[in-house]
């Protein structure tokens, strides 16, 4: 296995040549704390020229850690010195770190949840494609390119949102069209008061937020048992997403040909979207495992 610095997304990566395939270490959604293995074909003739990849995502059993220990009001990041000098109840909560761990634990459960929804609602697959296209045109998603762009919103969140809209709709699944389901998903984004309410998958009505939940996240959309927040990354971006959803719904209802305004030109560069863009140097392998850097210093000193 050889190590090089020419990985996609500006990340340091390791590559391993398989039969007809190449394996490369990358980052899921350009998040350095979510490493994954990307498999892509090396023979274009066998793949018929299609640019497809397979991502192997690491996960662990959902029952390895009790969900209550990964709650947003718990602290799970502390040093040995801190544990010995300060009680754990005095430490600030680490809601985002806890959500990142819980996300890996529940990955299989959430994929099964989405798979069942796809089987139940025939229009869901195309509705998800419409949502992703809409998010790309509004610069909430960026295409895969040589520059890594961290996206607080990702395709899986949009897929779960569309599945939720289809499950809570009063229209029969067999009678729902992709465009109708797309509008229902936008309506969920546009009509929810994310400052004061939270959504739970499969429940049509939102519920009031507690004080602890308000302090932990800016947007709340939980899985069926209410442990994991699908929208934990969004933060203040939820205001922009909600505004664009409201605007798109108005255009869809008011314009005779709304395609260009809703699904039109896709902006491929963050520099064309934001007034200020911050570029950071590529992270080394020690960013994925800080203990590795400590071991290297010990061996070289």
Image: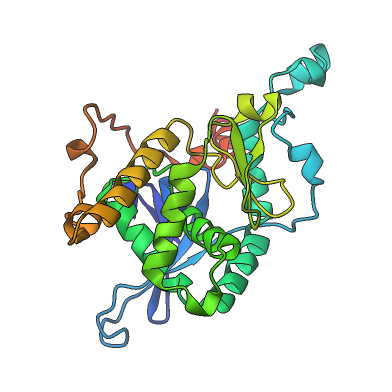
Left or right of 160 on screen, residue 274: left
Q: How is the image coloured?
A: rainbow
Q: Residue at x 44, y 30 (%)?
A: 236
In the picture shown, does residue 56 fall above or below 28?
below
Q: Residue at x 47, y 73 (%)?
A: 176
Q: Residue at x 21, y 58 (%)?
A: 258
Q: Residue 160 location in percent, x, y? A: 54, 58
Left or right of 19 on screen, residue 231: right
Q: Residue 165 location in percent, x, y? A: 53, 59
In the picture shown, does residue 177 fall above or below 164?
below
For the C terminus, the quadrant is: top right
Based on the displayed image, in which of its 4 quarters is residue 294 positioned? top right
Residue, far top: 85
User: Is 290 or 150 nearer to us in this picture?
Assistant: 150
Left or right of 200 on screen, residue 82: right
Tell me if residue 165 can be seen. Answer: yes
In the picture shown, does residue 119 fall above or below 57?
below
Q: How many marks?
A: 0
User: Is 286 or 175 nearer to us in this picture?
Assistant: 175
Left or right of 188 on screen, residue 223: right
Tell me if residue 23 can be seen. Answer: no
Q: Residue 69 location in percent, x, y? A: 79, 38
Q: Residue 117 location in percent, x, y? A: 58, 70
User: Is 262 or 278 nearer to us in this picture?
Assistant: 262
User: Is 64 or 180 nearer to us in this picture?
Assistant: 180
């Amino acid at each position: 296995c050889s190590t090089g610095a020419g990985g996609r997304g500006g990340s340091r990566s390791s590559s391993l040549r398989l039969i007809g395939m190449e394996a490369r270490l990358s980052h899921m959604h350009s998040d350095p704390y979510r490493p994954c293995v990307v498999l892509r074909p090396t023979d274009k003739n066998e793949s018929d020229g299609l640019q497809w990849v397979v991502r192997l995502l690491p996960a662990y059993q959902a029952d390895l850690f009790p969900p209550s220990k990964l709650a947003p009001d718990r602290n799970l990041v502390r040093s040995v010195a801190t544990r010995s000098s300060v009680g754990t109840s005095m430490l600030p909560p680490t809601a985002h770190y806890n959500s990142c761990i819980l996300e890996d634990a529940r990955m299989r459960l959430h994929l099964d949840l989405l798979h069942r929804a796809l089987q139940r609602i025939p229009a869901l697959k195309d509705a998800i494609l419409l949502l992703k296209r809409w998010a790309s045109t509004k610069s909430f998603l960026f295409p895969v390119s040589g520059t890594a762009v961290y996206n607080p919103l990702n395709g899986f969140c949009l897929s779960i949102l569309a599945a939720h809209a289809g499950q809570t709709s009063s229209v029969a699944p067999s009678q729902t069209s992709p465009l109708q389901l797309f509008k229902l998903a936008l309506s969920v984004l546009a009509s929810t008061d994310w400052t004061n309410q939270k959504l739970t998958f499969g429940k049509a009505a939102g519920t009031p937020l507690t004080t602890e939940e308000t302090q932990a996240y800016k947007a709340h959309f939980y899985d069926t048992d209410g442990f994991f927040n699908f929208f934990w990354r969004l933060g203040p971006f939820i205001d922009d997403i909600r505004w664009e959803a409201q605007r798109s719904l108005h255009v869809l209802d008011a314009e005779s040909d709304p395609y260009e305004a809703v699904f039109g030109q896709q902006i491929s560069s963050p520099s064309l979207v934001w007034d200020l863009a911050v570029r950071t140097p590529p992270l080394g392998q020690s960013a994925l495992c800080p203990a590795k850097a400590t071991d290297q210093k010990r061996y070289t000193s």
